[in-house]
Image (cartoon, rainbow, N blue to C red):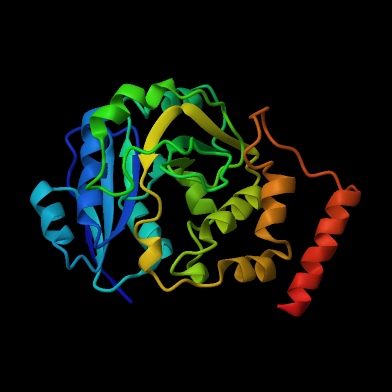
Amino acid sequence: MQVSQFHKRTLDFTPVFSILIPTWNNLPYLQNCVTSIEKNSYYKHQIIIHVNHGEDGTLAWIKQQGYDYTFAEQNAGVCYAFNAASALAVSELLVLSDDDMYYCPDWDKPLVEEVKQLNHIYFCINGTAIEPRESGNACVIAPQNFGKTIEEFDEQALLKQYHTFAFKNWTGGNWYPMVLHKYIWQLIGGLSVEFSPGMGSDPDMMMKLWHAGVRYYKGIESSRVYHFMSRSVSRVKKNNGRKQFLHKWNISIGTLFKFYLKFGGDFKGPLKEPVMDGKLKMRLFKDKLKRITS
Protein backbone atom coordinates (compact mmCIF):
# COMPACT_ATOMS: atom_id res chain seq x y z
CA MET A 1 0.00 0.00 0.00
CA GLN A 2 1.25 3.47 -0.85
CA VAL A 3 -0.46 6.85 -0.86
CA SER A 4 0.90 8.04 -4.18
CA GLN A 5 -0.75 11.43 -4.65
CA PHE A 6 -1.26 14.50 -2.45
CA HIS A 7 -3.04 17.27 -4.34
CA LYS A 8 -3.78 20.60 -2.67
CA ARG A 9 -5.33 23.58 -4.45
CA THR A 10 -4.99 27.24 -3.48
CA LEU A 11 -8.18 28.36 -1.77
CA ASP A 12 -9.61 31.82 -2.36
CA PHE A 13 -11.38 31.78 1.03
CA THR A 14 -10.57 30.96 4.64
CA PRO A 15 -12.34 27.68 5.52
CA VAL A 16 -13.97 27.20 8.91
CA PHE A 17 -13.59 23.39 8.81
CA SER A 18 -11.30 21.10 6.87
CA ILE A 19 -13.58 18.14 6.19
CA LEU A 20 -11.81 14.79 5.70
CA ILE A 21 -13.71 12.16 3.69
CA PRO A 22 -12.25 8.74 2.87
CA THR A 23 -13.93 6.88 0.01
CA TRP A 24 -13.54 3.50 -1.66
CA ASN A 25 -15.37 2.97 -4.98
CA ASN A 26 -18.49 4.61 -3.55
CA LEU A 27 -18.97 7.46 -6.03
CA PRO A 28 -22.78 7.97 -5.88
CA TYR A 29 -22.65 8.24 -2.07
CA LEU A 30 -19.60 10.51 -2.16
CA GLN A 31 -21.27 12.82 -4.69
CA ASN A 32 -24.38 12.97 -2.51
CA CYS A 33 -22.26 13.71 0.57
CA VAL A 34 -20.17 16.46 -1.02
CA THR A 35 -23.18 18.05 -2.71
CA SER A 36 -25.00 18.23 0.64
CA ILE A 37 -21.99 19.93 2.26
CA GLU A 38 -21.80 22.47 -0.55
CA LYS A 39 -25.48 23.42 -0.48
CA ASN A 40 -26.44 22.91 3.18
CA SER A 41 -23.47 24.38 5.09
CA TYR A 42 -23.83 27.74 6.85
CA TYR A 43 -20.08 28.39 6.51
CA LYS A 44 -17.56 27.66 3.74
CA HIS A 45 -15.31 24.68 4.30
CA GLN A 46 -12.34 22.92 2.73
CA ILE A 47 -13.30 19.45 1.45
CA ILE A 48 -10.45 16.93 1.33
CA ILE A 49 -11.18 13.49 -0.11
CA HIS A 50 -8.95 10.45 0.23
CA VAL A 51 -9.52 8.04 -2.66
CA ASN A 52 -8.85 4.36 -2.15
CA HIS A 53 -8.60 2.56 -5.50
CA GLY A 54 -11.16 4.79 -7.23
CA GLU A 55 -11.70 2.52 -10.22
CA ASP A 56 -15.37 3.55 -10.39
CA GLY A 57 -14.49 7.02 -11.68
CA THR A 58 -14.08 8.66 -8.27
CA LEU A 59 -10.64 10.10 -8.93
CA ALA A 60 -11.63 11.52 -12.31
CA TRP A 61 -14.73 13.15 -10.79
CA ILE A 62 -12.72 14.73 -7.95
CA LYS A 63 -10.16 16.15 -10.38
CA GLN A 64 -12.97 17.54 -12.52
CA GLN A 65 -14.57 19.20 -9.48
CA GLY A 66 -11.25 20.57 -8.25
CA TYR A 67 -11.31 19.26 -4.68
CA ASP A 68 -8.21 18.62 -2.61
CA TYR A 69 -7.44 14.92 -2.52
CA THR A 70 -5.03 12.15 -1.65
CA PHE A 71 -4.93 8.84 -3.51
CA ALA A 72 -3.89 5.24 -2.96
CA GLU A 73 -4.00 2.74 -5.82
CA GLN A 74 -5.24 0.01 -3.47
CA ASN A 75 -7.57 0.15 -0.47
CA ALA A 76 -5.39 1.66 2.26
CA GLY A 77 -8.21 1.57 4.84
CA VAL A 78 -9.57 4.49 6.85
CA CYS A 79 -6.56 4.96 9.15
CA TYR A 80 -4.12 5.81 6.37
CA ALA A 81 -6.92 7.63 4.55
CA PHE A 82 -7.72 10.08 7.34
CA ASN A 83 -4.05 10.59 8.20
CA ALA A 84 -3.17 11.33 4.58
CA ALA A 85 -6.08 13.71 4.03
CA SER A 86 -5.31 15.61 7.25
CA ALA A 87 -1.89 16.53 5.85
CA LEU A 88 -3.66 18.89 3.41
CA ALA A 89 -5.86 20.58 6.04
CA VAL A 90 -5.85 24.38 6.08
CA SER A 91 -8.20 24.97 9.00
CA GLU A 92 -7.28 24.32 12.61
CA LEU A 93 -10.64 22.55 12.98
CA LEU A 94 -10.91 19.11 11.39
CA VAL A 95 -14.15 17.27 10.68
CA LEU A 96 -13.95 13.51 10.19
CA SER A 97 -16.74 12.22 7.95
CA ASP A 98 -18.00 9.04 6.32
CA ASP A 99 -18.69 9.24 2.58
CA ASP A 100 -22.21 7.83 3.01
CA MET A 101 -23.54 10.80 4.95
CA TYR A 102 -25.94 13.52 3.82
CA TYR A 103 -25.43 16.80 5.71
CA CYS A 104 -28.69 18.49 6.70
CA PRO A 105 -29.13 22.29 6.48
CA ASP A 106 -26.93 24.37 8.81
CA TRP A 107 -25.35 21.24 10.28
CA ASP A 108 -22.14 23.15 10.89
CA LYS A 109 -23.52 26.20 12.71
CA PRO A 110 -24.13 24.59 16.14
CA LEU A 111 -20.76 22.81 15.96
CA VAL A 112 -18.93 26.08 15.37
CA GLU A 113 -20.93 27.76 18.15
CA GLU A 114 -19.98 24.95 20.53
CA VAL A 115 -16.27 25.30 19.74
CA LYS A 116 -16.39 29.09 20.12
CA GLN A 117 -17.84 28.92 23.62
CA LEU A 118 -14.96 26.77 24.86
CA ASN A 119 -11.71 28.32 26.11
CA HIS A 120 -9.58 25.28 25.24
CA ILE A 121 -8.89 22.84 22.40
CA TYR A 122 -9.25 19.59 24.36
CA PHE A 123 -12.60 18.56 22.94
CA CYS A 124 -14.26 15.91 20.80
CA ILE A 125 -17.51 17.30 19.42
CA ASN A 126 -19.90 15.34 17.22
CA GLY A 127 -22.93 15.87 15.05
CA THR A 128 -25.91 13.53 15.43
CA ALA A 129 -26.74 10.94 12.79
CA ILE A 130 -30.22 9.95 11.63
CA GLU A 131 -30.18 6.30 10.56
CA PRO A 132 -32.68 4.13 8.67
CA ARG A 133 -32.54 1.16 11.04
CA GLU A 134 -32.10 0.48 14.74
CA SER A 135 -28.62 -0.67 15.73
CA GLY A 136 -28.67 -0.26 19.49
CA ASN A 137 -26.60 2.93 19.27
CA ALA A 138 -27.94 5.42 21.81
CA CYS A 139 -26.11 8.29 20.08
CA VAL A 140 -28.19 8.23 16.87
CA ILE A 141 -31.78 8.98 15.90
CA ALA A 142 -33.21 5.68 14.66
CA PRO A 143 -35.07 4.14 13.02
CA GLN A 144 -35.99 6.92 10.62
CA ASN A 145 -35.87 5.48 7.12
CA PHE A 146 -35.34 7.96 4.29
CA GLY A 147 -33.66 5.30 2.16
CA LYS A 148 -31.26 2.48 2.95
CA THR A 149 -29.47 2.99 -0.37
CA ILE A 150 -28.72 6.03 -2.50
CA GLU A 151 -31.29 4.80 -5.04
CA GLU A 152 -33.99 4.84 -2.37
CA PHE A 153 -32.96 8.15 -0.82
CA ASP A 154 -35.89 10.54 -0.29
CA GLU A 155 -34.09 13.85 0.12
CA GLN A 156 -37.21 16.00 0.10
CA ALA A 157 -38.88 13.99 2.88
CA LEU A 158 -35.69 14.20 4.95
CA LEU A 159 -35.47 17.96 4.51
CA LYS A 160 -39.05 18.34 5.72
CA GLN A 161 -38.59 16.16 8.81
CA TYR A 162 -34.92 16.03 9.93
CA HIS A 163 -35.35 18.82 12.51
CA THR A 164 -38.60 17.44 13.99
CA PHE A 165 -37.16 14.40 15.80
CA ALA A 166 -36.80 15.05 19.52
CA PHE A 167 -33.35 14.15 20.84
CA LYS A 168 -30.76 15.32 23.37
CA ASN A 169 -27.14 16.36 23.54
CA TRP A 170 -25.19 13.20 24.33
CA THR A 171 -21.79 12.13 25.55
CA GLY A 172 -19.24 9.63 24.32
CA GLY A 173 -17.60 10.83 21.09
CA ASN A 174 -16.61 8.05 18.64
CA TRP A 175 -19.16 8.79 15.88
CA TYR A 176 -18.90 10.96 12.78
CA PRO A 177 -19.15 13.74 11.91
CA MET A 178 -16.50 14.52 14.53
CA VAL A 179 -14.79 17.85 15.18
CA LEU A 180 -11.24 17.85 16.56
CA HIS A 181 -8.66 20.59 16.79
CA LYS A 182 -5.75 19.90 14.46
CA TYR A 183 -3.25 20.31 17.31
CA ILE A 184 -4.98 17.55 19.29
CA TRP A 185 -5.20 15.33 16.20
CA GLN A 186 -1.46 15.74 15.70
CA LEU A 187 -0.76 15.28 19.41
CA ILE A 188 -2.31 11.79 19.39
CA GLY A 189 -0.87 10.89 15.99
CA GLY A 190 -4.21 10.68 14.14
CA LEU A 191 -5.64 7.20 13.68
CA SER A 192 -3.44 4.23 14.64
CA VAL A 193 -2.47 2.40 11.45
CA GLU A 194 -2.00 -0.91 13.28
CA PHE A 195 -5.82 -1.04 13.29
CA SER A 196 -5.93 -1.03 9.47
CA PRO A 197 -8.16 -1.36 7.59
CA GLY A 198 -9.99 0.31 10.47
CA MET A 199 -12.09 -1.84 12.83
CA GLY A 200 -11.55 -0.56 16.37
CA SER A 201 -9.64 2.52 15.23
CA ASP A 202 -12.30 4.97 16.44
CA PRO A 203 -12.47 3.62 20.02
CA ASP A 204 -8.66 3.54 19.97
CA MET A 205 -8.71 7.22 19.01
CA MET A 206 -11.10 7.94 21.89
CA MET A 207 -8.71 6.19 24.28
CA LYS A 208 -5.76 8.17 22.91
CA LEU A 209 -7.75 11.38 23.34
CA TRP A 210 -8.54 10.38 26.92
CA HIS A 211 -4.87 9.75 27.73
CA ALA A 212 -3.98 13.09 26.10
CA GLY A 213 -6.31 14.85 28.56
CA VAL A 214 -9.53 15.28 26.58
CA ARG A 215 -12.60 15.13 28.82
CA TYR A 216 -15.09 17.17 26.77
CA TYR A 217 -16.95 14.64 24.60
CA LYS A 218 -20.22 16.15 23.38
CA GLY A 219 -22.68 15.15 20.70
CA ILE A 220 -24.75 18.11 19.45
CA GLU A 221 -28.32 17.04 18.75
CA SER A 222 -29.12 20.04 16.54
CA SER A 223 -26.28 19.21 14.12
CA ARG A 224 -27.80 16.49 11.98
CA VAL A 225 -26.72 14.22 9.15
CA TYR A 226 -28.39 11.29 7.47
CA HIS A 227 -26.24 8.15 7.50
CA PHE A 228 -26.79 5.25 5.10
CA MET A 229 -24.81 3.01 7.50
CA SER A 230 -21.52 1.34 6.55
CA ARG A 231 -21.78 1.05 2.79
CA SER A 232 -17.99 0.38 2.55
CA VAL A 233 -17.45 -1.56 5.78
CA SER A 234 -19.59 -4.40 4.46
CA ARG A 235 -17.07 -4.95 1.62
CA VAL A 236 -13.80 -4.88 3.55
CA LYS A 237 -11.87 -7.80 5.06
CA LYS A 238 -12.06 -6.81 8.71
CA ASN A 239 -9.29 -6.80 11.29
CA ASN A 240 -10.12 -7.97 14.83
CA GLY A 241 -10.27 -4.50 16.30
CA ARG A 242 -11.83 -5.53 19.60
CA LYS A 243 -9.02 -7.97 20.34
CA GLN A 244 -6.37 -5.46 19.27
CA PHE A 245 -7.90 -2.79 21.50
CA LEU A 246 -8.06 -5.15 24.47
CA HIS A 247 -4.40 -6.12 24.19
CA LYS A 248 -3.24 -2.54 23.55
CA TRP A 249 -5.09 -0.82 26.38
CA ASN A 250 -5.75 -3.74 28.78
CA ILE A 251 -9.44 -2.90 28.84
CA SER A 252 -12.27 -3.73 26.43
CA ILE A 253 -14.04 -1.27 24.16
CA GLY A 254 -17.19 -1.89 26.19
CA THR A 255 -15.41 -0.84 29.38
CA LEU A 256 -14.19 2.34 27.72
CA PHE A 257 -17.68 3.21 26.52
CA LYS A 258 -19.51 2.42 29.78
CA PHE A 259 -17.14 3.52 32.52
CA TYR A 260 -15.02 6.22 30.88
CA LEU A 261 -17.05 7.87 28.13
CA LYS A 262 -20.52 7.22 29.65
CA PHE A 263 -21.52 6.39 26.10
CA GLY A 264 -24.89 7.65 24.89
CA GLY A 265 -25.84 9.29 28.18
CA ASP A 266 -27.14 12.83 28.53
CA PHE A 267 -24.33 15.37 28.28
CA LYS A 268 -23.61 16.76 31.75
CA GLY A 269 -20.32 18.51 31.19
CA PRO A 270 -16.70 17.35 31.09
CA LEU A 271 -16.16 13.76 32.13
CA LYS A 272 -14.22 12.72 35.22
CA GLU A 273 -11.93 9.81 35.97
CA PRO A 274 -14.00 6.67 36.52
CA VAL A 275 -14.58 5.68 40.14
CA MET A 276 -12.78 2.44 40.99
CA ASP A 277 -15.81 0.84 42.62
CA GLY A 278 -16.88 -2.80 42.74
CA LYS A 279 -18.53 -2.69 39.31
CA LEU A 280 -15.45 -1.33 37.57
CA LYS A 281 -13.13 -3.69 39.43
CA MET A 282 -15.25 -6.65 38.33
CA ARG A 283 -15.32 -5.37 34.76
CA LEU A 284 -11.53 -4.97 34.71
CA PHE A 285 -11.13 -8.48 36.12
CA LYS A 286 -13.29 -9.85 33.30
CA ASP A 287 -11.23 -7.89 30.77
CA LYS A 288 -8.07 -9.41 32.26
CA LEU A 289 -9.49 -12.90 31.78
CA LYS A 290 -10.36 -12.03 28.17
CA ARG A 291 -6.77 -10.96 27.53
CA ILE A 292 -5.42 -14.19 28.95
CA THR A 293 -7.76 -16.40 26.96
CA SER A 294 -7.72 -14.51 23.63
* Residue shown at the point (25%, 44%) measured from the top left: 152
> Eyeballing the image, is 225 above or below 228?
above
Decide if residue 198 is on the left or right side of residue 44.
right
> Which quadrant of the rendered structure holds the N terminus?
bottom left
Q: Position of residue 248 (x, y in %)?
A: 66, 68
Total numbered labels: 0
Q: Position of residue 25 (x, y in %)?
A: 24, 63
Quadrant hosting residue 40: top left
> Eyeballing the image, is 145 above or below 57?
above
> Which quadrant of the rendered structure holds the C terminus?
bottom right
Q: Position of residue 181 (x, y in %)?
A: 47, 41
* Pick the front one: 265 or 203: 265
Residue at the outermost left position: 64
Q: In this view of the protein, can residue 192 be seen by the observer?
A: yes
* Residue shown at the point (25%, 58%) measured from the top left: 26
Residue at the outermost right position: 278
Q: In this view of the protein, can residue 43 be seen by the observer?
A: no
> Eyeballing the image, is 194 above or below 70?
below
Quadrant hosting residue 168: top right
Q: Position of residue 229 (x, y in %)?
A: 40, 50
* Residue shown at the point (52%, 48%) measured from the top left: 135
* Pick the front one: 143 or 180: 143
* Residue shown at the point (44%, 38%) measured from the top left: 129
Decide if residue 43 is on the left or right side of residue 39.
right
